[in-house]
Amino acid sequence: MTDNYTVTPWEVKGNIDYDKLIKEFGVSKIDEALQKRIMKHTGEMHRFLRRNIFFAHRDMKFILDEYEKGNKFFLYTGRAPSGNTHLGHLVPWIFTKWLQDKFDVELWFQFPDEEKFLFKENMTFDDVDKYLYENMLDVIALGFDPKKTHFIIDTKHAGLMYREACKVAKRITFSTTRSAFGFTNENNIGSIFYTAMQAVPAFLPSIIRKKKMPCLIPHAIDQDPHFRVSRDVIPKIGFYKPASIQCRFLPGLGGMSEDGKMSSSSGDSATIFTTDNAKTVKNKINKYAFSGGQATIEEHRKIGGNPDVDVSYQWLTFFEEDDAKLVDIYRKYKSGEILSGELKKILIDKLNAFLESHQIKREEARKNVDDFIYREGK
Ligand code: TRP
């Protein structure tokens, strides 16, 4: 293939062509009609929908049909602990929180603590345990309701999950996983089995609640191969085929052409973590955020900047709620009225305001972790 991008559950890089990805993956574009239909229930359209950051789906119509008949769905998403949380990770979770509030539904949040242990050569379970805790704090800090939110940790809830994972695994051949994930004879057998574990929370709540319930999975588009495979299997074992809704990646600071997903493996400096302090955020943006500005101030005033490639502007499309403000910034940057340093400053202030309050909630979350972890009767 001549594409200069890769999107798999293990690797995301390059200049991603999302329209092409829709066709390759076989997901459907979220069109205006669907946006409106969602809005009928939510009363407002989240900025991630308005700006096509959540851009694709599978079976959203089924979810809404059932919801309109009074058959509520549950939400399912997850995070494989493998490092500290960065801002890109928050994107699907922020949207999931909004869906939970607007539809008043339960969320099952999986922490597959075996996933990165199996897939990453040097990852130990001790490392994973540390990140698991840190990652849980970030999820809680976003404000999920503990009564309606249940954390599933694969090795801790193995007794609940393993039997269900076997039901899935029995119906997936090596040949299927090979074509969905590109596995070869060199992959370890744990990684080949793993997709069965990621399938389980899409129907486990139906078992726990003793009632067949529709499932909606908000996730970044790279996770789709897992659900493409499990969607074929889950109806065969007696549950609804899970629906899903997919988002794009927050571009890396270094520019979208180099790093589609904000990858923490490309060095900590090019990534903003939820625990970074105001000074670090300022330094990182000033130093690393790819600029669409001109080489000199004179030239910039004359020709103007290019917001479409400017990472600070792209980030504002994720984090600035106000459409009018965003349009104004776009226009002023393009005309040369705003300089790159000024644009960066707008982003720095926006991120630091968000992080200041996130970090307070994150500290408070330490007291509440146990309230979120699923236990019988919860
Ligand atoms: N595989 C995901 C990761 O690498 C974690 C995950 C588990 C997940 N279940 C999910 C992500 C459901 C989205 C939706 O982080």
Image (tube, rainbow, N blue to C red):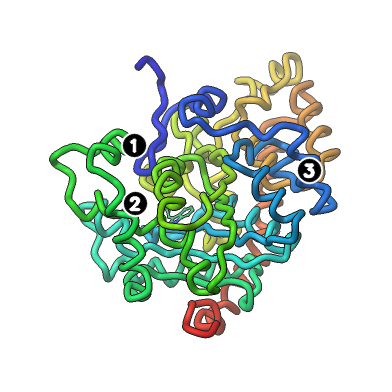
On the question of residue 230 being in view, the answer is yes
Residue type for callout 1: Ala
Comparing 248 with 131, the one in front is 248
Image quadrant of ligand 1 equals bottom left
Tag 1, which secondary structure?
helix
Q: What residue do we see at 64% from left, 69% from top?
A: 144
Q: Which residue is mark 1?
A: 180
- For image coordinates 72% across by 30% down, the residue present is 339
Estimate the spatial distance between the alpha carbons at disc 2 and disc 1, rounded to whole Å: 10 Å
Secondary structure of the residue carrying tag 3 is: helix
In space, the residues marked 3 and 2 are separated at their CA atoms by 32 Å
- The quarter of the rendered structure image containing the N terminus is top left
Instruction: Give how far across and how far down residue 309 sits, in percent.
Output: 60, 26
Type of amino acid at the residue the image marks with label 2: Thr
Q: Are marks 2 and 1 in contact (CB under 8 Å)?
A: yes
Q: Does the beta carbon at disc 2 come under 8 Å from ligand 1?
A: no
> In the rendered structure, are the residues bearing label 1 and label 3 in contact, judged by CB atoms less than 8 Å apart?
no
